[in-house]
């Protein structure tokens, strides 16, 4: 039995050292993907679930997220196979989103806008799996560069939620800014600003596909935790 385990580890390392293969993996305890071609873009919320609503502009998170998702798809369209998890104002359960992404893509990026105390500003990126760290670093860095200073980054958060733990593919959730902050909400209401956000997300995906985790720092430790359930944490 011991010999078998060692053999399996060797085979797995040999496969990793060779040509890049993007495969499904339940735990994600591996380096981030490189050379992937199929990207799933998830616009958060939808249908009966509006997500956050700005008290300043009245804009709904589900609409802003879908707009940014469409823009990302348009920017990546020529070089990647891009799928929109929802292409309209439609409610899809989080567990269904997980299954759709796992079945149909190499990586998943879920797009959201944030809500909280009115003083909070700036993009924030959530990941859980080791194989999602590099892409998360790239997404947060690209968003930080696209958003006006000084409130241009709330950083990277390792959190186990359904869309960061449950898909069997690298998966990252970006909160592109706070609809609950008046200044940021006014920016998010502008199409040109949403286009910049989309450009940042697309650029991060391009960099990850071209370079893998190169330059994104050390990988975080693997954490063995069961899939996230609706009752686990705020989503
Ligand atoms: Zn949201």
Image (cartoon, grey):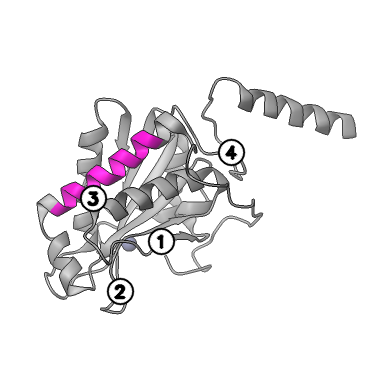
Visible residue check, residue 1: no
Whichever of callouts 1 and 4 sits on the residue coming sooner in the sequence is 4
**Pointers 1 and 3 in contact (CB under 8 A)?**
no
In the displayed orientation, state which residue is furthest to the top: 19
Whichever of callouts 3 and 2 sits on the residue coming sooner in the sequence is 2
Picture coordinates of residue 145, whole percent (x, y) = 28, 52
From the viewer's side, name the closer residue of 223 and 44. 223
Tell me the SS state at disc 3. helix
**Pointers 2 and 1 in contact (CB under 8 A)?**
no
The local crowd at label 2, few if under 14, some if 14 to 19, many if 20 or more residues have their Cα within 10 Å, is some
Residue 71: quarter of image? top left
Whichever of callouts 2 and 4 sits on the residue coming sooner in the sequence is 4
Question: As drawn, is 221 to the left or to the right of 151?
Answer: right
Marks 1/4: CA distance?
26 Å
Picture coordinates of residue 148, whole percent (x, y) = 21, 60
Marks 1/3: CA distance?
16 Å
From the viewer's side, name the closer residue of 24 and 146. 146
The circle drawn on residue 25 is 4
- Residue occupied by mark 3: 197
Residue 29: quarter of image? top right
The local crowd at label 3, few if under 14, some if 14 to 19, many if 20 or more residues have their Cα within 10 Å, is many
- Residue occupied by mark 1: 155
Q: Is mark 2 within 8 Å of ligand 1?
A: no
Marks 3/2: CA distance?
18 Å
């Amino acid at each position: 039995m011991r010999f078998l385990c060692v053999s399996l580890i060797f085979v797995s390392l040999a496969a990793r050292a060779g040509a890049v293969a993007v495969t499904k993996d339940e735990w994600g305890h591996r380096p981030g993907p490189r050379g992937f071609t199929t990207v799933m873009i998830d616009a958060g919320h939808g249908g009966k679930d509006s997500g956050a609503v700005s008290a300043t502009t009245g804009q709904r998170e589900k609409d802003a997220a879908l707009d940014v998702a469409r823009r990302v798809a348009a920017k990546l369209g020529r070089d990647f196979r891009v799928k929109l998890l929802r292409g309209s104002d439609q409610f899809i359960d989080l567990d269904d989103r997980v299954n759709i992404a796992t079945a149909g893509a190499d990586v998943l990026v879920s797009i959201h806008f944030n809500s909280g105390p009115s003083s909070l500003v700036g993009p924030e990126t959530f990941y859980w799996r080791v194989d999602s760290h590099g892409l998360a670093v790239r997404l947060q860095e690209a968003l930080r560069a696209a958003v006006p200073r000084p409130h241009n980054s709330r950083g990277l958060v390792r959190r186990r939620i359904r869309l960061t733990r449950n898909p069997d593919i690298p998966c990252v959730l970006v909160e592109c800014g706070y609809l609950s902050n008046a200044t940021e909400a006014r920016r998010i209401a502008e199409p040109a600003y949403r286009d910049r956000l989309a450009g940042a997300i697309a650029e991060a995906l391009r960099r990850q596909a071209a370079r893998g985790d190169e330059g994104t720092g050390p990988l975080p430790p693997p954490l063995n935790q069961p899939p996230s359930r609706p009752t686990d944490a705020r989503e």
